[in-house]
Amino acid sequence: MLASRIGSFEGLRVADLFAGTGALGLEALSRGAAHCTFVEKDIAALDALRRNLDRLDAAARAEVRAQAAEHAATPRAPCNLVLMDPPYRSGLAGRALARIAAGDWLAPGAWVSIELSGEPLEVPEPLALETERRFGKAQLLLLRRRA
């Protein structure tokens, strides 16, 4: 769904919030994203993420931040795409989304992809819901920043 909406990943600046081992951000880098900021607070996941970056020779195009996504500092440059896969039913999706919507996280026209399960989410300005899909218990939202 994401690739069909945004087209090419070439040259995009990406953030992978609640990154875990980095699967989403690494996929974006493998599709040509210029840079990915990975945000994760779990030490074991961070170790695995760093190993994955090294194995895939992607560390030069990445920044790893050991912090909670809902409190993460603004990236060095605005992102074209933010990927969020927070723990289900934690309430963290809404807090992290409010943080990135209120700051300088998003470039004009940026996309935000969020995976949820069983929790409501209020979409803050300047974001708007573009599409929503359900896959079993998972819900995938694709938001876009209004220019």
Image (cartoon, rainbow, N blue to C red):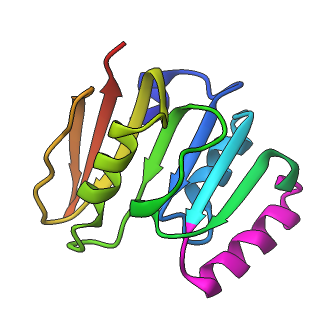
State the extent of the magenta-drawn residues as a range. 40-58
Instruction: Name the residue located 24 percent from the left edge and 74 percent from the top edge.
Output: 90
The C terminus sits in image quarter = top left
**In the shown orientation, is residue 35 left or right of residue 13?**
right
On screen, 138 above or below 34?
below
Instruction: Name the residue located 24 percent from the left edge and 55 percent from the top edge.
Output: 94
Extreme-top residue of the structure: 147
Front in this rendered view, residue 121 or 106 = 106
Q: Position of residue 87 (x, y in %)?
A: 34, 73
On screen, 90 above or below 7?
below
**In the shown orientation, is residue 109 left or right of residue 73?**
left
Q: Position of residue 18 (x, y in %)?
A: 47, 65
Front in this rendered view, residue 72 or 13 = 72
The verdict on residue 44 being magenta is yes
Extreme-bottom residue of the structure: 44
Front in this rendered view, residue 126 or 48 = 126
The verdict on residue 51 being magenta is yes
Q: Main secondary structure of the magenta part?
A: helix
On screen, 29 above or below 18?
above
Instruction: Name the residue located 35 percent from the left edge and 55 percent from the top edge.
Output: 96
Instruction: Name the residue located 13 percent from the left edge and 66 percent from the top edge.
Output: 118
Q: Quadrant of residue 138?
A: bottom left
Q: Position of residue 46 (x, y in %)?
A: 66, 76
The N terminus sits in image quarter = top left
Q: Position of residue 13 (x, y in %)?
A: 64, 34
**In the shown orientation, is residue 48 left or right of residue 108?**
right
